[in-house]
Amino acid sequence: NDAIVTRNKVRETLRLFQAVCRKLLQEEEAKPERATHRRIDLQASKILKEKGKCVNVGKQIFGSVPGVEVGDDFMYRVELNIVGLHRQIQGGIDYVKQDGKILATSIVSSGGYDDDTDNSDVLIYTGSGGNMMNGDKEPEDQKLERGNLALKNSMDAKNPVRVIRGDSKSTDSVDARGRTYIYDGLYLVEKCWQEIGSHGKLVFKFKLVRILGQPELAGKVVRKSKKFKVREGVCVDDISQGREKIPICAVNTIDDEKPPPFKYTTHMIYPHWCRRLPPKGCDCINGCSESRKCPCLEKNGGIPYNHNGAIVEAKPLVYECGPSCKCPPSCYNRVSQHGIKFQLEIFKTGSRGWGVRSLNSIPSGSFICEYAGELLEEKEAEQRTGNDEYLFDIGNQFNDNFLWDGLTTLMPEAQSGADVEVQNSGFTIDAAQCGNVGRFINHSCSPNLYAQTVIYDHDDKRIPHIMFFAAENIPPLQELAYHYNYMIDQVFDSNGNIKKKNCYCGSPECTGRMY
Ligand code: SAM
C-alpha cells in the first residue's frame, strides 16, 4: 500500500535526520568552549540532501503532503523542509506559481509576531516584510507582494493552505532547542486586511480558519488540561503514590474500570543470591570528558548522550557513571538513572488494556522510563506461565537497527566503538506484582520507543537495566509503544501448547499477531 510506504519513508527520513543531528551535536559538544559552532540542523539537512534522502522533493504540493500527518511534531524548522511540508528555511509564507499566479502552499506561525491567538481553529496571521523582524532597518509599510500576495490569491482562489505552528512559549519541550513545530492541518484564508502594526506602519493581516473534519489536535487537549489543572477522565491521581518525581495519573474515558492493583517500585528488585558488585568508577572530580580519558566514557567508545540528555545512537550496552564515580550527579553520562522527565499518564485503550502516553512533546532520543520489576532467572520465569503478561526477557530487545538504519552509510566516519552484545542472558524482569509505569507500555508493530540496556550501579553484564528511549519525535498524547519481539508460534503454555495472541496495535503495518 502506497500510503504506508510513504508514511514510513517520511518517518525514516526524520529519524535519520535526528540521528545525524545528534551525531553532529556530539562532535560540537566535544569542542573546546570557545570554538565556533556550526548550525547542526542545516549541516544535517545538507548531508541528507546530498545523499538523496529527502522526501516530496519534486513539484511543490498544495494541500496534504504524502506521509505527513496532522499532529506530527518537528524539533527543527529545517525538518519541515526535508519532508516537503514547508520549503522556506526562514520565510514564514511558502508559495509557488501556478497558471501565472502565485499561491500560498504553507505558512509557519512561529509566534515571532505578537498576534497569534490560542484558539486552534482560527489563526490571525501577520504578513511578511516591512522590516518588522529586523530591528536594524527602518520600519516600512508591508507590500502586497510575494508571500502576502500569495496568501491573498489563495483566499480569492479558496485554495487550502497548510499551517505549521511553532510553539516557542511551550514548556512542553524539555530540551535546549525549546521549540516544537506542529503540523496543524489545512486552513482556508477567509479574510485579509491592512492595519497599523506595533511599529506604526501598515501590516497585512490574514484570518485563516481550519477546515473541518481533520483530527483534533492534542495540543488543544493539553492546553485545556493545563488551564483547568485537571485531566478529563482521571481516575487515579498518581499511580506511583508519590514515588516518582512527577505524578503519573490514570485516565479512563472508556468505562469505569480502574487500573488493577500492583506494588509501585521505581527500582529493580533483585533476588537474595544476586550479589551486585559496584563497578570501579572514574575519578573525574571535575566532570567526565573524553579529552580527560574518562574510563567510563572509554567503555562506551565516547560519550553516549548529548548534553540535552538525548541518546546519540542505540548501543549493545551503555555504561553510565555510577555510585563509585567521582563525577557530580550532573555528569552528562548520567541520564536514565535520574528517572522520568516527562509528564506521563496511563490511559485505558479500547483493545489493549492500559497504555502509556505523555502530555509533552518528546524529542527523538529522549529517555522515557525504565522497565522496573523483579529480576528472575529464566527457569523461574517459565514457571510463571499463567501470569506471563509482564515479563521482559533481557537480551531479547527488538533493535533491528531500525532506529539508526542508514546512519553509518551517511556518516561512515562517525561509527563508534561497539561492545559485546548482551544476548539472551537467561534473566527476565517480571513486573506483574511489582513494577513501574514501564509495565503499562504496550507492543506496537510500528514502535516509537526502543529498549536500551544500560548499566551503572553494578558490573554484571547479564543483568543490565532495560531503559526506554524515544526512537523519533513523539507528539503529546500519542501512545508510547515498543516492539515486544515475540516469535510467532514460539510462546507456550504450561502444557507445552503453542499460545497465540492477536495484536491490536492499530498501526497500518500491524502483522496481526503478537505471538
Ligand atoms: N495493556 C497492559 C495492561 O493493561 O496492563 C500493559 C502492557 S503489558 C506489559 C502486556 C499485555 O498488554 C499483553 O500481554 C497484552 O495483553 C496487552 N497488549 C500489549 N500490546 C498489545 C497489542 N499491541 N495488542 C493487544 N494486546 C496488547
Image: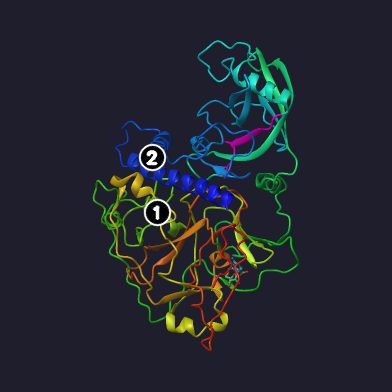
Q: In which quarter of the image is the C terminus?
A: bottom right
272, above or below 109, in the image: below
Q: In which of the image's four quarters is ligand 1 placed?
A: bottom right
- Depth check: give the residue in front, 116 or 97: 97
Q: Does the residue labelled 1 lie within 8 Å of ligand 1?
A: no
- Residue 34, how many percent across, how many down? 31, 32
- Residue 418, how many percent across, how many down? 29, 58
- Amino acid of disc 1: Pro
Badge 2 marks a residue whose secondary structure is loop
Check residue 360 for magenta coloring.
no
Q: Does the residue labelled 2 lie within 8 Å of ligand 1?
A: no
Q: Which of marks 2 and 1 is in front?
A: 2
Badge 1 marks a residue whose secondary structure is loop
Query: Residue 439 lies in what quarter of the image?
Result: bottom right
Q: In this view, does 372 lie to the left or right of 120?
A: left
- Depth check: give the residue in front, 395 or 95: 95
Disc 2 to disc 1, how far (Cα)? Answer: 40 Å
Q: Name which residue lies at 29% across and 48% down.
A: 289
Q: Name which residue lies at 33% across and 53% down.
A: 327
101, above or below 243, in the image: above
Is residue 333 among what the camera can see?
Answer: yes
- Residue 186, how many percent across, how many down? 67, 37
**Residues in magenta, as a range:** 159-172
468, above or below 192, in the image: below
Label 1 packing within 10 angstroms: few (<14), some (14-19), many (20+): some
Query: Residue 126 lies in what quarter of the image?
Result: top right
Q: Name which residue lies at 61% across and 40% down.
A: 183
Q: Where does label 2 land, which residue?
A: 51
- Depth check: give the residue in front, 234 or 7: 7
Q: Residue 329 carries which label?
A: 1
